[in-house]
Structures are given as C-alpha cells and as structure tokens.
C-alpha cells in the first residue's frame, strides 16, 4: 500500500465507510504504533491532546467544502490515540517510531516537518530560530514547524552538522534512537545510522551534553560533557560511551592577535600551553624531566599531530592519546 492509498484508507475510516477488512488494517496499524510508542500520558493530558489533534486531523483530511456525513466515535478515538502515540513526541520530547515513512503526510498536517536527503550531496536547512543544519546524504531529520517555549527538539536519522543559534533559555536537543545531545548554542556533528554499530557526536565549538536515551535511570543518566575537538562514540550493543578526540583537531580559540606557532628556545611547558589554548585540548607531561627541555621550530600551518611529532622528536619523547587527553612521556633532552 502506497502513501496515497493509505491516506485514502484513513479518510474512509474516519468517515465510517470502511469495510471490515479495511478496519482491521487500520486497527492493526494503530495497535502496532502504540505498542512501540514510549509515550506515557495521564487521562487529562490525553484528553487535551486528543481535542487539539482531532481538530487538526479534521481540518487537514476534510476540506472546508466537503461535508462529512457520519463518524464512528470509535474511529475518532482510535485515530486520535494513534496520532498521539506517534506524534505526541513533539509535545513531550519523547523518541518514538518516527521512521515510518507512511506517516509523513499526516505528520506534515500536524505541524511536523520531515526532510529526507535522497541526493548524494549535503542539504542545508535553516530553522525558524536561525539555527542551521547540513543534512548529509541518505539522512533525514524531523522537527516541529514551530518550537515550543521550553526547548528546540529535532529528531535525526543518519548524519548532520548542526550550527545552533545560542539561546540560554531554550536548549537545542537532538534525539536519535539511542542518544540525546543537548546544547544552548554551538556547532557539532552527529552520525547515527541504523546499520551502524555505534553513534558518534563530534564537537566543533562550544560545549555539548550527550547522554543515553533511556528511562531506566532518570537521576543518573549515562552521559558526558564534550568540548571542542572532542567526540563521543556510543556502542549500541554494550551501551558504553567512549570519549575521544576528533581525528583532525582544529584551532578553535584564535586570539585577537595573529596566532603564532614560532618558538625559539621556548620551554616545553609554554609550547604545550599555547597548543592547549589554541585547540582546547588537555596535555599532561608524565615525566617532569621533560619540563626542563626547550623547543625551537616553526609549527605554523601544519596539523596538531604533525606539531606533536616534531615537538616529541625534539625532546626525545612520545605522545599517546587516552580519551580526550594527550599524554607526553620520555627520557627528556638531558
């Protein structure tokens, strides 16, 4: 059944003109959606949302010039319930089965926008708050047409780069199936593909809070805070969050004066401090004898890893990345 046929079938169901076989299809679909939904509502919340959503269902499915002769109340109740089960997430920030493609037209009618990038080129999306999203190929993102007063929630499937407009009073939240990424204003990349064994979050600027999308332990969530040039890898099977550095760290803190990586007889501690200031990465010297060493070289316009290779070779040391920290050790220059 294609999208058009399904919409027509739902319209017939709401009008009360379905056959028993067609009603069985709708009820089976409804039961399946609700069974997989994580949404939990009390009776008052359900009643309020039913009223709001049913009004929008009527408006979108039945044009003003079309007269609906009769309704089945059971159809109304089930329709409102199944819509709540799927799209109530945009009112309560829950992650549910938003990947079902045959619900897209209904989502659009309810003020939910879904963008699928089926091309082989990144697609740029600008949100109403000024935030920008670069959606990578074979990826999709869903978000409400208008954000609520408390949060800015979007739902990602695949990979995207986010440049979030800062708003301290309204956090920007990216939901994937297993992780939640929350920021106030920053830039970062999320990779979350269904066929991948892991999810990655890579931070370019600002600070990002990443935690597991689980209701098992609300007070002690499995999560970390990431800063520029850091990333997190979430193993879907083991549920472990593994912090690390991005493959190619870039300069994120450029001072007012021109950044200079020219050193002449400069103590190693000062060299590393300048790298720390530029890349926002922590360096730890394990052998304090290395602090007696000085370094002379021009490190401009080369990558951080090449800079470290030259520094370590000069002072008879090696470096090792452990998580988000780079450790330097060796016998020293003496």
Image (spheres, rainbow, N blue to C red):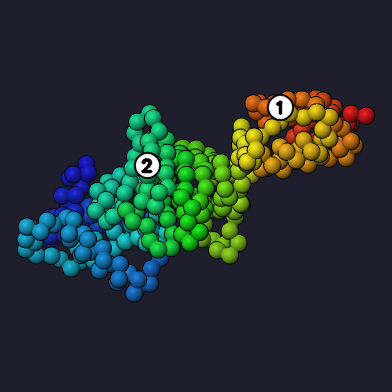
Foreground tag (2 vs 1): 1
Mark 1 crowd level (few <14, some 14–19, many ≥20, 10 Å Cα): some
Q: Is residue 58 left or right of residue 251?
A: left
Q: Secondary structure at mark 2?
A: strand
Residue drawn at (40%, 49%), measured in percent from left and top?
A: 130
Mark 2 crowd level (few <14, some 14–19, many ≥20, 10 Å Cα): some
Q: Which quarter of the figure has residue 300?
A: top right
Q: Quadrant of the N terminus?
A: top left
Which numbered circle lies on residue 299? 1
Q: Is residue 40 above or below residue 159?
A: below
Q: CA distance from mark 2 to mark 1?
A: 37 Å
Callout 2 touching callout 1 (CB < 8 Å): no
Q: Position of residue 75 (x, y in %)?
A: 19, 63
Residue drawn at (48%, 61%), measured in percent from left and top?
A: 169
Q: Secondary structure at mark 1?
A: loop
Q: Position of residue 99 (x, y in %)?
A: 36, 46
Q: Which quarter of the figure has residue 96?
A: bottom left
Q: Is residue 214 left or right of residue 249?
A: left
């Amino acid at each position: 059944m294609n999208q058009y046929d399904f919409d027509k079938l739902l319209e017939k169901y709401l009008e009360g003109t379905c056959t028993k076989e067609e009603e069985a299809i709708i009820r089976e679909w409804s039961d399946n959606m609700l069974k997989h939904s994580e949404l939990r509502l009390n009776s008052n919340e359900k009643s309020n949302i039913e009223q709001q959503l049913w009004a929008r269902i009527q408006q979108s499915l039945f044009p003003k010039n079309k007269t609906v002769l009769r309704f089945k109340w059971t159809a109304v109740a089930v329709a409102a319930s199944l819509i709540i089960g799927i799209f109530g997430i945009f009112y309560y920030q829950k992650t549910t089965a938003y990947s079902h493609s045959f619900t897209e037209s209904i989502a659009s009618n309810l003020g939910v926008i879904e963008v699928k990038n089926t091309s082989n080129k990144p697609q740029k999306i600008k949100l109403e708050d000024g935030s920008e999203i670069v959606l990578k190929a074979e990826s999709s993102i869903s978000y409400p047409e208008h954000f609520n007063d408390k949060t800015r929630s979007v739902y990602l499937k695949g990979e995207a780069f986010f440049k979030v407009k800062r708003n301290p009073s309204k956090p920007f939240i990216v939901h994937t199936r297993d992780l939640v990424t929350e920021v106030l204003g920053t830039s970062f990349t999320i990779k979350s593909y269904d066929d991948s064994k892991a999810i990655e979050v890579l931070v370019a600027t600002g600070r990002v809070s990443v935690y597991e999308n689980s209701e098992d332990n609300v007070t002690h969530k499995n999560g970390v805070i990431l800063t520029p040039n850091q990333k997190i890898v979430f193993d879907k099977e083991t549920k472990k969050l593994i912090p690390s550095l991005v493959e190619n760290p870039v300069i994120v803190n450029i001072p007012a004066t021109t950044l200079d990586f020219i050193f002449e007889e400069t103590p190693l501690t000062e060299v590393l401090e300048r790298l720390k200031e530029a890349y926002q990465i922590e360096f730890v010297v394990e052998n304090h004898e290395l602090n007696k060493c000085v370094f002379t070289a021009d490190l401009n316009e080369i990558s951080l890893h090449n800079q470290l290779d030259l520094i370590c070779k000069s002072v008879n040391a090696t470096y090792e990345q452990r998580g988000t920290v780079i450790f330097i050790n060796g016998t020293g220059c003496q």
